[in-house]
Structures are given as C-alpha cells and as structure tokens.
Image (cartoon, rainbow, N blue to C red):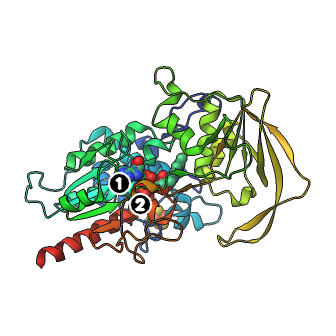
Amino acid sequence: MAVSKTRTPIREQEPKIRAKNFDEVCLGYSLEEGKIEANRCLNCKTKPCVQGCPVGIDIPAFIAEIKNGNMDEASNILSRYTSLPAVCGRVCPQENQCEGLCTVGRIKDSQPVAIGKLERLVADWKLANKKTNVTFDKALKNYKGRVAVVGSGPSALTVAGDLVKLGYYVKIFEALHTAGGVLIYGIPEFRLPKEIVKKEIENLLSLGVEIECNAVVGQTVTPEELKENFDACYIAVGAGAPKFQGVPGTSLPGVYSASEFLTRINLMKGYLFPEYDTPIKRAKNVVVVGGGNVAMDAARSALRLGAEHVTVVYRRSAAELPARVEEYHHAVEEGINFAWLTNPVEYIANDEGVLGAVRCIKMELGEPDESGRRRPAPVKGSEFTIDADCVIEAIGQGANKVLLSNFPDLELTKYGYIKTQENSCKTNLPWVFAGGDIVTGAATVILAMGAGKLAAKEIDEFLNNKNKK
Ligand code: FAD
Ligand code: SF4
C-alpha cells in the first residue's frame, strides 16, 4: 500500500471561534485517524526518531501497537519512558526533535510521521480508559531511601515518578498552591488543558509520590530541614523570574511581564473573572514584545480576553522566530499581527497617566552573536508609534532567587543558575542534585524531563553506594 506523503489532517477548532474561547485548539486524532497516520511509519531499523527524543521513547514500537489497534500495549510502552505523555504530545517541539529526524520527512515532498500527535492519542486513550500503570509493589514500605524534590514542574514530576518506582520515599515541595510548574501557571488552557496535567499528576500520586503545596523551600522549609529529614534532594525550581527590557515607562499601569500576565490567567483563572477573583486588564490594543512560545501564548491569551488588535513586536525577522512553528501558524490564523525587525524604545503614558502607546524603532540584522543568530541593531531615525493600552514583555525569564539565596554553599554559574557537573545533575554538594530550567536557563519540557530521568539514575546510584558503606 502506498504511504501518503502528507500527514493525516488533525481536527482543530475554527480560528474565528477559538480566538474567543480558552478551550483546547487541537482536538486530536480519533483511533481510526491515528491508525492511518501510524501506517505512514516505516518502522526503521535504525530508529532515527528515537535519537531525537531526549527521553529515548521507543517510538516505532508504540506506533506499531497503534497500527495493530493495541492501545493498551502502546500505552505501556510510553509509560516505560515518560510520566507525562499527554503533556509532551501537546507541547514538545517535535519538529526539532523526533519528527525532525524522521525518515519519512526526508523523502521528497513528504511530511514526517506526526509522532507527537500519536503520542497524545495514546496518552489521552490511557487517561480515558486506564486508571494507572502501577508497575511496582505499592505495599513496599521498606523504602530504599528518602528523597526530597523541590518544585513540581516536569523535571520534578519525572524524577519523582522514576524514584518512587525504584522503591524510594519521595516528597515534592511546591511553593504555589497547585502542582505542575509552568504546565499549570504558564502554558494556557487552549494549548494544554489543566485537567490533563492534573490527571497525569494524579497518576504519580497513585504510585505513592507525596506532594506538599504552599511549601517554599528557602523560606517555609529550610535546606537544613531537608538535609535532616532526607537522604538526597533534587532541585527543579525552574526559571520563572520575570525580566524587563527596562525601557522608559516600564512602571506604567498597563505594562506586564508575560510571567505575571499568564499566571493571572492560567493559575489564578483571571479569564473567568468575576467568578474567580483575579483582576486582569481587558485591553483593546495589545503589544507583545518577544518571539518565543511565551510571546505566542501571551498574544493569543490577550486576544481571547477580547483585544481588538494584538501585535507581536520582534527584533529579529520571521526566519529567526524561536516559537514553535505550529504556535506561530495558529497565532497568524487567529489574526495576531507581527511587526518584524522592531523593538520598543519607550512606553508612553496617556493623559490619565496609564499606558497609551509604544514607541518603537526598526532594527536590521548584523553579524551573528554568541547564539549564532544575526545580531539586531537599531536603524537610526526609524522610530514610530503603536497605540497600546497594554504591553506584555515576553523576553525571557531568569533564576528565582528565593531558594538559591537561602541554600548556602550551593555553587551557581555566572548567570545565577545552579552549577552541575558536565552531562550530570550532580551539584557541588553530594546530597543535592539539580536539573531543568534552573540549570539550563529557560528551555523545554522534554529537556527538563530528560534531566529528571538522569537525576533519578544518579540519585539511585548515590544512595546505593551510601547504603553499601
Ligand atoms: P518549572 O516548570 O518552571 O517548575 C518549577 C516549579 O518550582 C514551579 O512550580 C515553582 O513554583 C516551583 N518553585 C520555585 N521556587 C520554589 C521554592 N523555593 N520552593 C518550592 N517550589 C519552588 N516548553 C516546551 O517544551 N513547549 C512549549 O510549548 C513551551 N511553552 C511554554 C510557554 C510558557 C508560557 C512558558 C513560561 C514556558 C514554556 N515552555 C515550553 C518551557 C517549559 O515549560 C519549561 O522549560 C519547563 O516547564 C521547565 O521545567 P522545570 O521542571 O525545570 O520547571
Ligand atoms: Fe517511523 Fe519516522 Fe521513526 Fe522511521 S524515523 S521509525 S518512519 S517515526
């Protein structure tokens, strides 16, 4: 049977309709559509797709089970490698990872197998049809050791899942009132429904992981308390501290960091005001500064809050845009405008003393900078103004200082992230391991999960060696 060059189309909400609601945009494959897409996989012996997956999922194996209609086995295969398949299937940058290396995508005019969408299909099937994959003896009370995990984002959830399956007592400490990290407070409902994240966390709880929310390590829980009560600790506190460009007018009412704007909407449910008591500005003209996934999420959220014009200003060109291609396309379909090679230079107050306009300057690309991308430079005399009653800066996040400034002796990098040994989660303190964004700086869900997997292995080795002594 000839294999289709193009992917099985995926159902999505219509752009005009979805631009006015927070429901999930992508509706996923049916089992039948999934089988058709799975049949495009060539089951390559060399498995190039697996090399592109930071947690090494046996991709052809789980796709083969979809072909055979054996969803149960497909789900068992996934859960050997990942605790968060429903999340990864939705938000991983597959185009740069597994799908980027897929053999089918290298055939002339062919699109790679939709691996991410198939992962999501299996994960959603599991959430709807199976309670959990308990693969260890839950009655086990003779724990091999006690491990504290700080933070509850994808890195923390992964290390916790792997360690509990190895027979450790694992307790997660989370500063916020809800577990999930960026998956809960950053990525909006229309890309990653919070119910999906909650169900994946419930699976971990059913394996025996304990989670204590409202526990800020460095303040309400001290590092000394962790050392006294646990044999090892994994720090995965992310990089959620907002950054601003610092242009004049940044303190005007109407100027937000993307972290604050998205947290108000996602974690605090500001879009459901007054049912939820979180005020959020419902602006008419919104300018979003930046070009990553965070900028796309902020722009599309502002649109859904009722904005008439949303403009993303990005200092480089479309070719350098770091956001996922899918998110950019969705944003364009929904009517978001893009001002390429543009940067704000001032936020201007209106007569009432609140934000009324953004003064921008055109940019041009020069020589490549340390990231390999061409460095943008302002074009003299090219300033212009955009009307705006709200600006959201999405120019990256930094390390959160609360824990770090209260963890004496923990070595940091010059950028303020936790320093670990090369290709390892080991810090300078033998009982402390670290991974995810707090080590790499803002990165991706799957890289944070990959670090969690590595840390579980290293913590197990460390505690096995300690127990032998
Ligand atoms: P986080 O997810 O940041 O979790 C850290 C947790 O630690 C938080 O819950 C925090 O409250 C908690 N914490 C902090 N300090 C303390 C303390 N002192 N005590 C206790 N708990 C503490 N990646 C993708 O792959 N695809 C995407 O589409 C994508 N979109 C994104 C959209 C947005 C808006 C943002 C902000 C990020 C996005 N990312 C995306 C990046 C991705 O979400 C992160 O790389 C990933 O979540 C990092 O995981 P983590 O486990 O290191 O930390
Ligand atoms: Fe299937 Fe593509 Fe992986 Fe080959 S590279 S096994 S075609 S998903």
Q: How many numbered markers are drawn?
A: 2
Rendered residue at 26%/46% (across/down): 211
- The amino acid type, in three-letter code, at marker 1 is Gly
State yes or no: discs 1 and 2 in contact (Cβ < 8 Å): yes
Residue type at mark 2 is: Leu
Per the image, label 2 sits on a secondary structure element best described as helix
Judge left or right: residue 91 versus residue 63: right
- Whether residue 37 is visible, yes or no, is no
The structure residue drawn at horizontal position 54% and vertical position 37%, both measured from the top left corner, is 25
Q: Secondary structure at mark 1?
A: loop
Q: Residue 19, position in %: x, y?
A: 62, 32
Say which residue appears at 50% left-offset and 25% top-offset: 272
Q: Is mark 1 within 8 Å of ligand 1?
A: yes
Q: Residues within 10 Å of mark 2 (few under 14, many from 20)?
A: many
Is residue 459 depicted above or below 181 in this figure? Answer: below
Q: Mark 1 to mark 2: distance in Å? A: 8 Å
Q: Which residue is mark 1?
A: 218
Viewer-nearest residue: 466 or 354: 354
Q: Which mark is residue 204?
A: none
The residue located at (89%, 52%) in the rendering is 382
Estimate how packed mark 1 is, as few (under 14), some (14 to 19) or many (20 or more) residues with alpha carbons within 10 Å.
some
Corner quadrant of residue 426: bottom left
Task: Look at mark 2 in the image and give the residue it sits on.
Answer: 404
Which image quarter: residue 237?
bottom left
